[in-house]
Image (spheres, grey):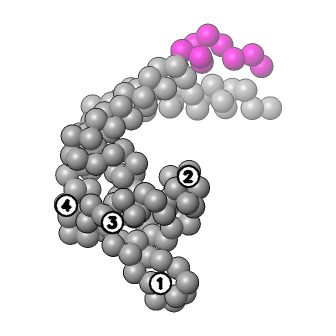
Amino acid sequence: MRISKTDIESLAQFRYALRQFLRFSERASRQAGVSPQQHQLLMTVKGMRGRNWANVAEIAERLQVSHHAAVALVTRAQNLKLVKRAQGKEDRRTVQVSLTPKGEALIAQLAELHHQELGRLSHILLKQLQSIGNAARRRRP
């Protein structure tokens, strides 16, 4: 089944709304005094289910960067007093990265701003996702 012009329009609108959100996020991070990558690091650590730390391999995977790049990012964030490192409790070969009180305050501030922006864009994103999902289901054999 051929993809329709309407389907492409939905994809384009979704991508535009997503890019608006990402651009907002980049600006908000910089205005808060951190790079977008440092913000993503804080989100990754804070967003780990069931615990308040992440190891470097998890950070690298979540940010889709190399292990070496994740280590460098953690080092820069540690120099800014946003994160701290600790030896793993169960596996002493691992390094557990957690947020400092400064990192906690910053991620709370940025998360509030991001929730507000997502509220603004949610109707566009949801409408386009639904349209894209319907088109994908139509093309399934």
Circle 3 — which element? helix
Position of 50 with respect to 118 (left or right) is: right
The label shown at residue 102 is: none
Quote the CA–CA distance across marks 3 and 1: 17 Å
Of callouts 1 and 4, the N-terminal one: 1
- Quarter of the N terminus within the rendering: top right
Of callouts 4 and 3, the N-terminal one: 3
Q: Residue at x 36, y 52 (%)?
A: 38
Q: Quadrant of residue 99?
A: bottom left
- Counting from the top left corner in percent of width and height, residue 109 is at 19, 52
The label shown at residue 65 is: 2
Is disc 1 surrounded by few (<14), some (14 to 19) or many (20+) residues within 10 Å?
few
Residue denoted by label 3: 78
Vertical relation: 24 (above or below) 64 = above
The magenta segment: 1-10
Is disc 4 surrounded by few (<14), some (14 to 19) or many (20+) residues within 10 Å?
few
Do the residues bearing badges 3 and 1 touch, measured as CB atoms within 8 Å?
Answer: no
Q: Nearer the viewer, residue 39 or 140?
A: 39
Q: Residue at x 33, y 66 (%)?
A: 78
Q: Nearer the viewer, residue 8 or 58?
A: 58
Quote the CA–CA distance across marks 4 and 2: 25 Å
Residue denoted by label 1: 88
